[in-house]
Image: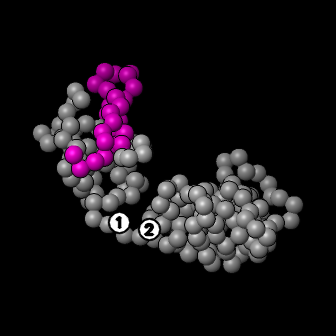
């Protein structure tokens, strides 16, 4: 598994009879699935054993603790999912054996983000400070609310034994002044009492 591997989706089921499979991407814009020709598969947490007559590759995925590399021949949009085929999967039975497998691709294979565009995975863990230099917390999650994305921050409580404080800040230009990926911080126009 590459050191920069990111989970980008799961195999939902077989698609058709020629070894294609349906993928449920974790992103509404699954460009990472299209840009990588090698997917690293791990079994789902609840997947155990192999199906009736899977290929050796599918059997390895179902039983392995180590990732299995799947060489992708083609991946494309289909309705609200992605469908793909591999050089290693030639029929429906083999595709069915992949059901539930988690898909990882190297972060380095993601397409370059445009100006003022960021992959969520790159924002996780960044420190968030306001214009006055007051620490507001670290990005622990992002949430899509439809028209905008919201940063979900966690900040250690000053009182011992209390859970971290949670803060939410809309990730929009009106509140976000600067994102410094190299410096690992985001500067915002936000106050502690908002």
Task: Report whether 79 appears left or right of 59.
Answer: left
Q: Nearer the viewer, residue 115 or 48?
A: 115
**Residue at image mark 2:** 110
| Disc marking residue 26 | none
Mark 1 packing: few (<14 Cα in 10 Å), some, or many (20+)?
A: few
Front-lying residue, 134 or 144: 144
Q: Does the magenta-highlighted stretch encompass residue 162? A: yes
Q: Is residue 7 visible?
A: no
Q: Residue at x 74, y 63 (%)?
A: 14
- The image shows residue 163 at horizontal and vertical percentages of 39, 26
Question: Which of the 4 image quarters holds residue 141?
Answer: top left
Q: Is disc 1 placed on a helix, strand or loop? A: loop
The quadrant of the picture occupied by the C terminus is top left
- Is residue 95 or residue 162 the one in the foreground? 95
In percent of width and height, residue 152 lies at 37, 39
| x then y, percent, for residue 11 | 66, 59
Measuring from the top left, give residue 106's x and y in whole percent.
48, 66
Identity of the residue drawn at 55% across and 62% down = 104
Q: Quadrant of residue 82?
A: bottom right
What range is drawn magenta here? 149-174
Furthest toward the right, the residue is 52
Location of residue 76 with respect to 101 vertically, above or below: below
Residue 113, disc = 1
Query: Does the magenta portion include 169?
Result: yes
């Amino acid at each position: 598994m590459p050191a920069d591997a990111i989970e980008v989706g799961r195999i939902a089921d077989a698609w058709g009879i020629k070894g294609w499979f349906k993928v449920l991407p974790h992103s509404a814009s699954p460009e990472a699935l299209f840009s990588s020709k090698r997917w690293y598969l791990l079994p789902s947490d609840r997947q155990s054993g192999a199906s009736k007559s899977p290929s050796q590759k599918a059997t390895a995925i179902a039983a392995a603790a180590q990732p299995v590399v799947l060489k992708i021949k083609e991946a494309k949009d289909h309705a609200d999912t992605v469908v793909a085929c591999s050089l290693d999967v030639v029929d429906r039975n083999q595709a069915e054996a992949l059901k539930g497998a988690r898909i990882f691709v190297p972060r380095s294979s993601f397409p370059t983000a445009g100006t003022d565009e960021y992959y969520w995975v790159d924002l996780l863990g960044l420190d968030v400070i306001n214009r006055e230099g007051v620490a507001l917390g670290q990005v622990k999650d992002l949430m899509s609310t439809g028209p905008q994305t919201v940063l979900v921050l966690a900040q250690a409580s000053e009182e011992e034994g209390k859970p971290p404080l949670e803060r939410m800040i809309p990730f929009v230009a009106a509140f976000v002044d600067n994102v410094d990926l190299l410096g690992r911080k985001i500067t915002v126009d936000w106050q502690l009492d908002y």
